[in-house]
Each structure stands twice: as structure tokens, then as C-alpha cells.
Amino acid sequence: MKHVIWTALALACATVSTTAVAGDAHGTTADEARALAETGATGDFARSLQAQEKRLQAERSYYPAMFRAAYARYPRIPAGALEALAYSQSRWHQLRPDRNGEPTHGDMPRAWGVMGLYAGDGFADQVGEAAALLGTTPEQVKHSPSTNILAAAVLLDRELRGSARDDEALAQALQRYAGFGESPGATVGAVDAYARESFAFDVLLGMDRGVNDNGIRVPERAVQWERAFPADTLARLNAPLVRLDLDRDTVETEAFAIDPRSEQLVTRQAAGNAVAGNGIADAGSVQSLATVDFPGARWVTSPNYSSRGGTAVREVAIHTMQGSYAGSISWFQKASAGVSAHYLIRSSDGQVTQMVRESQKAWHVRSHNPHSIGIEHEGYISNPDWYTTAMYNASAAITRQSCARYAGIVCTRAMKTYTSADLSDSSYDILGHQNLTDNSHTDPGKYWNWSKYYGLINPGSGGTTKIVDSFESSVGHFVTSPAYSGSTTGISTASTAARNCSIRHGGSCSLQVRLVDNTSSSASWAVRLLSGSGNPGSNTALSRNGRVGFWVFVAGSGMSVAVGIDDSDGTERSTSKAVPANKWTYVEWKLSDAAQWNAWAGNSNGAITASTVKLDAIWFLHANTSYTVNAYVDDVQLRN
């Protein structure tokens, strides 16, 4: 029986290699076609994307048993840590860099297996170290998924020093485990320390949010962020502090405050204290925003740049890192790497790090360097799950800014599709690394959704319905549980939000929001179901001239719903609308009608005043009850 399982897994892993994936020979159903069209995916691209997702789900079905075996062997490792580590490093996909046909990306050290272990080449030799500890061979660690998971487990167990099992111990262990930066025992530089902190943060974020999508299962459990990292690190990393009791929070000081909109820790020190002498600017400070070219980006200095020599900027080059966000930050700051980009974008939440000023030439596309802006996206070209909504939104915002800033870049002169004709055409202003004539790379690859990206950098107007989330293939922007926000009251952490394909208004699936009463509280339910984790940068821009709405079905009476909107001056909350039980009801609010909005957080004034805004959250409001209530949301949209 065991031989059959491993053989099937080997076939599944081979199926999802980065060689060409054929389209679905059986075509798509009407519902599948509608869902794909709503994401901007059509034709051969849509069928290829759908086929790859099915293959990834098949591969991922084997991993939970392997994780359980690793926990049984190394019980000191906290539950969920291995699943989150695999999610952070590979999105639960067996990395086989010797078979993907992709040139090494700026000689970036390659990662192996579902746990993304490094094998030297400029980073630590995690593969060799783990093989020695397990008494096996490096090749077995690289190519056997079960051994690869055990290899990561033995390395993490080694770093979990002492008996402490709290989030502080895990965060420190993950930073030692990371595999990049200076050799063990050496003094760690500020940028490498930041990269290791980013790595640990991304793993802990997966545990904090939980993941239940496309075959990936990371159990959700609240991370005590204030214990995991110092306050200045939390602010720099965009760490969510959503579960802190703001009335008793000891992290908030004269230097730090909690933003009521994002529920994140931000700096409030004077501009003169914003940048330490280590090349890293603190997020949220005045000087940080002056240092970077894209507002909100983190600044980390790379030595790998040179003068443009007076050449005008006329191009944006889209890249995929073939690696992790944290690892790329570490690699790009090494002079010996000889490679860099202007911007790096994190998959999980769209966080942006800038490493080269736009006025300088980054080293990313050879002869195109003098006239291009380079944007690197976390992930691997073989796995479309890296290309998240938050990442697309952040990247598109940088590109839209480039179109406004440089006369030589016009957003309508961007790639729209992935075809052989497009790949051989380097006349676009906004194009992939794969388009450039003197480069052999194939990123961002066939799973980068050029049609969606074109729509984000060229937002349409007039007489249209824009589906923001259809829930056909994923939970979209709604990646956190109903109890995740610190503004939520009355419900317990047992509440969940997950894609459900048994009840829906249109298409095949909806978002099921399961609300469970907090028996230790008598407070009425006020549930802030966050969109984009409450981070405006992770949400889609909506026109103020439209009406925002969604379909909702509630299996019980007494429920009202509302929405929160991130405006230029704060977050406004709509008036609430009562919804009847056991029937699909469409609810919407006109963004330009001040009578439908109330001030909620920040400097909000009870009116939507910006020309474009972001959806902050869907609110569910109900009197306190001991009953569990199931609500379903479908087709969140903007109507013009």
C-alpha cells in the first residue's frame, strides 16, 4: 500500500513540473467559464490555469500525512508550524529546480522540495545539514517529499532551543533556521536581520491567518505578535495586531501607536529618528515615505546599482523571483550577487520593499537596465497560487504610478495575453522578463494573468459591473477568519470563513461565514469580516461613482449587514441593512451618497470623498445569541 501511495505522489509531482501544461482537453463548464472570465482569465490561459490548479490539489492531498509523521518524530515543533513553513517556501509544491528549465534567477540560490530547503550556492546548505542529521543522502532530501519534510523538521527542532514553546521562541528559531544571511555564529548585518525577520513573520502570518484553499491546509491559531517581535520590528513588518486588547496593550507607547483602521502598530516618532544607520527605514514615518519612490514601501539598500547616464525611463519589467521575498531581500543586498531590482513584492499581503531608487539603474534585465523599472514578485513560475490579489494590486499600483511619472511609459501599451506572438514582441512599455531579446528567462511565466493586470493598470469606467470576489476558485480578498479583527465583538475564534460549493447565488461557490457565539461575552455581534486583511494596499480600487454591493444568504433571522470603505481621510461605515432569512438578497450602497455613510475610524467624516476607494470589510450585525449562524456571501461587486 505504501508503495502505491509514493508512486502516485511521484506521478503527481512530475505532473506539476514547470514544463508546458496542456489545456483541459474536456473544456470547461458554463459555470467554470463564467468564473474564469470574472478573474480576467479566458481561452487557453484559463484552461491551462485550471488544469494546473487541479494537478496542484492532487499533489497536496499527500502532504498532511507526511506532516503528521514529522510532528510525531519531533513533538517539540508547535502544531501548524511545518504546514505554514511549507506554505511560505513553496505553497505546498515540490520544488525541483533541476527540472524546471528556468535559468538561475540572478544566480539566486535554488530551493528544493516542498519545504524549500537551500543547498548552498551562497545560502546555507540546509539539504546537506539535514541529510547528515537524518542519516540519509542529500539527493533523498531534495527529491523525496517525505524526507524533505523530515529534513525541515529536524532543522527546526534543532533551533527550538530550551523548553519554551511560545511565539517568541518560535520566531527566534525561525530566524536562525532561515538559511540565508551570515554563517552561524557570525555577526548578522541589519539587512540580513531584516530578511530573517521577514521570513519568520511570513511563516507566523500563515499560522495566524490559517489557510484553507486549493488543497492547502494550515490550521489557524492566534499568534501573540507582541511577544514574537519587538515593537519597532512589528511596525516595520506590517505585523497584524488584530487580537490585542487596545485598552490594556503594553506595546503602544510614546513611540508607537495602533492604527484603528489597519489595527497594525505604526511609528509616531519624529522624522529625524525615522532611519537608523543600517539602510532600513521604518514604515509609517515621514522620512520613510520621503526615502522611497513608492509611498508605503519599505526601504532596504542594495549595493547593486549604477547611473542611468541620462537615459529616460520608458519600460516596466515584470519578474518572478523564483524564490521567497525574504530570501530575495537577503540576496539582492549582497554585492557578490550582482543583481537587484527596484521593487520586491510579498505574496501574502502585497508588502513592497524598494532596494534601488528609480533614478538609478537596477541590474535586472541586461541591456534594458538603463531605461527600465524592475518589479520582482515572490514565488515560482510553476505555481499560480503565488500570484495573489494583494500582489497584483500592489504591483499594479507601482506600474500606474510609473505611467503617471514617466512620459515614455503608457499603461495602455502593456501586455494583455500570453501568446507566442506576445512573447516575441518587446515593443510593449509594460512587459515580462521573458519578452526581452537578450534574456533567456521565462518569468513571470504562463500563469501570470496579463489580462487581469492590464485591467488593474487601466481601470475601466461607465456602465459596467466589476466583480471583486466571486469565490469560484478561492476566498479572494477574504483570507482571514470572522474573529480575526480586533473590532469584532460577540463571536468566538471558532467562527470560520471558507469557500462553499453547496450553496451559492451564481456560479458554483460562495463564501460561507460561520458565526459562533463567544459564551464568555454578552456583547452583541459586530463582525468585521476583513477584505485584504484590513490593508488598503491589498484591496482593489473602486470608483466613487459606483455602488458597492453583494449577494447574501443568512440561515437565521435578525441579521443586518453593512460595509466599511477606506476613504482618503479614514474608514467610513455604511448604514446597515436588515436581510431576511433563508433567501438570497442583494444589498448595495451608493458610494457618492453621504446619507448612506457614517464616520467610523481615522479622520473619517461620514462621506466618501476620494475619487477611488477600497473595500475595508463586510460587517455582520446581530443581537447576542447562543446559536451558531451561517451566512453566505457571493459576487462582491461594484456597479457603475
Image: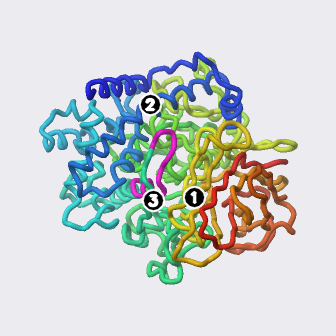
Residue at 53% x, 53% y: name it: 349
Question: Can you tell which quarter of the image residue 459 is in?
Answer: top right
- Residue linked to disc 2: 58
Disc 1/disc 2 C-alpha distance (Å): 28 Å
Q: Quadrant of residue 276?
A: bottom left
Q: Is residue 493 visible?
A: yes
Distance of label 3 from label 1 (alpha carbons): 11 Å
Which quadrant holds the N terminus?
A: top left
- Residue 568 is left or right of residue 298, and the answer is right
In the rendered structure, the answer to whether residue 599 lies left or right of residue 49 reads: right
Q: Which residue is mark 1?
A: 533
Q: Quadrant of residue 229?
A: bottom left
- In the foreground, 407 or 14: 14
Quick one: 594 or 336, which is closer to the camera? 594
At a point 57% along the width and 68% down the height, the residue shown is 517
Query: Which of the two discs, 2 and 3, labels the residue nearer the N terminus?
Result: 2
| Residue 190 place in picture, x, y as percent | 34, 61
The kind of residue on which mark 3 rests is Asp
For mark 2, does the 10 Å Cα neighbourhood hold few (<14), some (14 to 19), or many (20 or more) residues? some
Q: Specify start and end residues of the magenta stretch as a single range.
A: 203-216
Query: Is residue 298 magenta-colored?
Result: no
